[in-house]
Amino acid sequence: MATALAPARTRLDNGVVLLAKQTTATPAVAINLAIRAGSAADPAGGEGMTWLLSRVIDRGTAARSAGAIAEALDGRGVTLAIGVTRHLFSLVCTCLADDFDPVLDLLADVVTSPSLPDAEMATRKGEVVTAIRQDEDNPAVRATEALMALLYPPPHPYGRRTKGSVALVEGFTRDRLARLYAERFTPSALTAVVVGDIETGRAREAAARAFGGWRRPAAPPLAVPSPPPVSGRRRIVVPMMNKAQADIAYGFTAIRRSDPDYYACWLMNHALGQYALGGRLGDSIRERQGMAYYVSSALDANVAEGPLTIRAGVSPANVERAVASIDEELSHVRGEGLTPREVEASRTYLIGSIPRALETNAAIAGFLQTSELFGLGEDYDVRLPGLLRAVTVDAANAAARRLVDPDRATIVVAGPYEGA
Amino acid sequence: MIPMRATTLDNGLKVLVQEEHTAPLVSVWCWYKVGSKDEGPGLTGISHWCEHMNFKGTRNIPRDEVKGIIEQFGGTWNGYTWIDQTAYLETASRDALDRMLFIEAERMANGLYHPDDCESERTVIISELQGGENDPDQLLDQELTATAFKAHPYRNPTIGWLSDLQTMTRDDLYGYYRAHYVPNRATLVVVGDVEADEALRLVDRRFRPIPASTAAAPRRATIEPEQTGERRVTLRRDGTTGYLKIGYHAPAVTDPQFYPLLLLDAVLTGAKGLNLWSSFRVPPPQRSARLYRALVERGLASSISGALLPTAEPFLYVVSATATAGVPLADVEAAALDELERVRRGLITDAELAKAKTQLRARLVFESDSVTNIAHQLGYFETIAEARVIADAPARIGTVTLHDIGAAAQAMLTAANRTIGWFDPLAPGGPDAARPGPIARPAAAAFRA
């Protein structure tokens, strides 16, 4: 087992949380800033606004032009990746340790005083519209988006498209983005994680210098409701006759991350659709029947009840057989259950993979950021093996009966397929 | 840093061991000098298909015990095939080292290739091919490569052409496996929390019994004749978005012009580094790069990229752009060619060169952050050239001058040396809508999982 991460956690007096961890494997530092302002915070009628903000936020500040920011990052070999999930708006990069101070200062400038220039808005809208058009031609994206829209009908935010629609994006103004920024970007919503070849004391001083003067009132709480229950089986087809392969998205609403059964659900999902090449589903659909290059399941236990989604890419001729095989495997898991050997294999793998999952600075930073979002504590890496060991086979099978049921499945097929 | 240990067993297997005590992990890679350039007519895709078969069980690893063999150590395993090479890896806790070596020795000597598994995998691979066809950018990449090369087998997609995948037999696969999976065409790499002497002892015990073989003919490929005029390929199919690619014949990694062109690419599209396994998963720093400013900042393209990949023989330098919705591909192409011509005329500045060098040096640090990535680099370069390429890279990058870049750009960025590809979208279901034909995955690395 690797040494405990034991990050140093500090809360500045304005509410910014800093998590710092020193490593010395490479002379580099990973910086991961996350604001609790993901796409779930898009205003009514403003689907995609947070995404557009993520494209514009680093294109100018009160003190720096877009060109100056680009030069400062490129000149140090730094790629700033800005991402949006349902609940987080993230700015992530890795820099050489020697460049840590100027890069953190630059990122702080971007987070605390973006200028959102009108000219940049116009250019980035063009990029977002193009990305939406690309998504519309992608069967995997179409299937997943349609599944989420069915599982999370309005007003639930999880059913919305993160990038929004072409019509909405074209109508967004700088003022609306500025209002969204002003409401959601506040010190108490920010967690800064620094992992790498930098002493934690120096990281703390740098964070205090970069963010300590930022003063704004806390953002209003964001209430995310539970999705409506699904009582029957639903299935829709998105014909895309210009494509060669069909994508199947088959899913359920599942659980919150805070659910006491989370670890049982995680282990169950791993045995069902992840272990080795896709767990039981992979054994059946890829290995035994040779029907698909990929099939797997994913559990997104989130702030609200996220989905459990099974995805597969198959020839249009095999759509019916693949859906029937998923039904059959889920029925088996609900009925006879997973075997003790399967549960043990997944448990051993998940515990054994922790050192590998926490090998790089960027991976550690991501792990700490997730731990902070869900309030798991700075010792979560140490407690995690025990939490997995405590799951019984009965608990994993109870999780299967709770979460997966072909009679309540929502199924979307997108691709060169028009139905059975 | 502890120096790398290198040795060659009596059977010809090259062994590279690097101690890295930064995490309780070890990564083992086994590399074979076989890739899609070694495939003959009727057998395109066979290298990649063999790679799939080599996860199906061996004489001493029963089929139903494959699953879990490395997962019980919390490990991951995978493989990939590309134009010059096939590679397999395991990364797991350090106590799994001998298990990993056992797996690789079995894979080298004792694959089963059961006929039922061959048939089952045929449809999996055709599914992989069809998944690639769903992506217009991949389709265009494949067509561009096939157009740019008319003689060298780099023109074939790694996944193969559909008709070959439909007709290849189990005997074809097994014969190819036996000819190419031999110790004297392989390199074994061990990187991680190991003691080098102990690791070498374990390697020797597992691999020494495997005999050398000269069954496979020496690798020999037609030299691509010099391109004498611009080529074009235009795909008109249902779609929503236009894509442009411009490919130039480019030198192999051992050519003195490779590093000047790597820096030229950094100036044009941002530095990527040299790690095919990891670097291309992280976008390059490119906001101030020439083509980004010329295309994306002017609203003509929503994204641009460049790829000069290290290869054993001359391959391609490809610049790609996604047209912004509503912008004609002709406008994107004109702006891209204009910028490339400016660079060909030698208008790169000292400041741009300095920035490109800084970027590349940083990327070389970032792409060495795990035992898996370090092991990949040693094996990759030993297979296509020699392992020391990666250690020498910072110094080689440091010595490149503006004059070197100018000379390399003058030679490469000519109209006669380029192939231009368009994916020109037709509105889905419109009167001219085209349906997909039998087009396979582009000549990019075909990863197993």
Image (tube, rainbow, N blue to C red):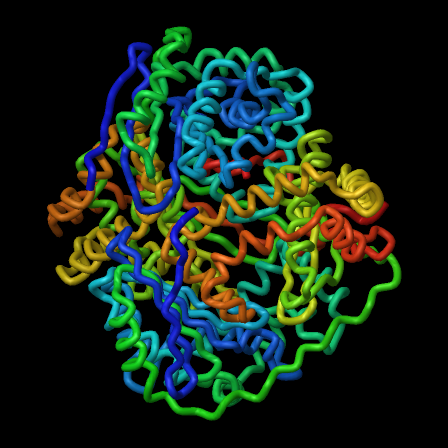
In the picture, which quadrant includes the C terminus of chain B?
A: top right
Identify which residue is drawn at 59% across, 27% down: B66
- Compared across the picture, whether A28 is left or right of B425 comes to left
- Compared across the picture, whether B119 is left or right of B367 comes to right
Quarter of the image for residue A236 reads bottom right
Identify which residue is drawn at 33% across, 65% down: B287
Quarter of the image for residue B121 reads top right
Please say whether residue B433 is visible from this viewpoint: no
In the picture, which quadrant includes the N terminus of chain B?
A: top left
Compare residues B257 and B195 and report the one nearer the observer: B195
Residue A251 at x, y percent in the picture: 74, 56
Quarter of the image for residue A133 reads bottom right
Residue B317 at x, y percent in the picture: 33, 43
Up/down of B180 relative to A280, above or below: above
Please say whether residue B26 is visible from this viewpoint: yes
Residue B375 at x, y percent in the picture: 34, 36
Residue B318 at x, y percent in the picture: 37, 45
Compare residues B365 and A180 and report the one nearer the observer: B365
Q: How many marks?
A: 0
Up/down of B159 relative to B200, above or below: below
Identify which residue is drawn at 63% across, 60% down: A300
Compare residues B266 and A252 and report the one nearer the observer: A252
- Compared across the picture, whether A371 is left or right of B409 comes to right
Identify which residue is drawn at 49% across, 70% down: A372
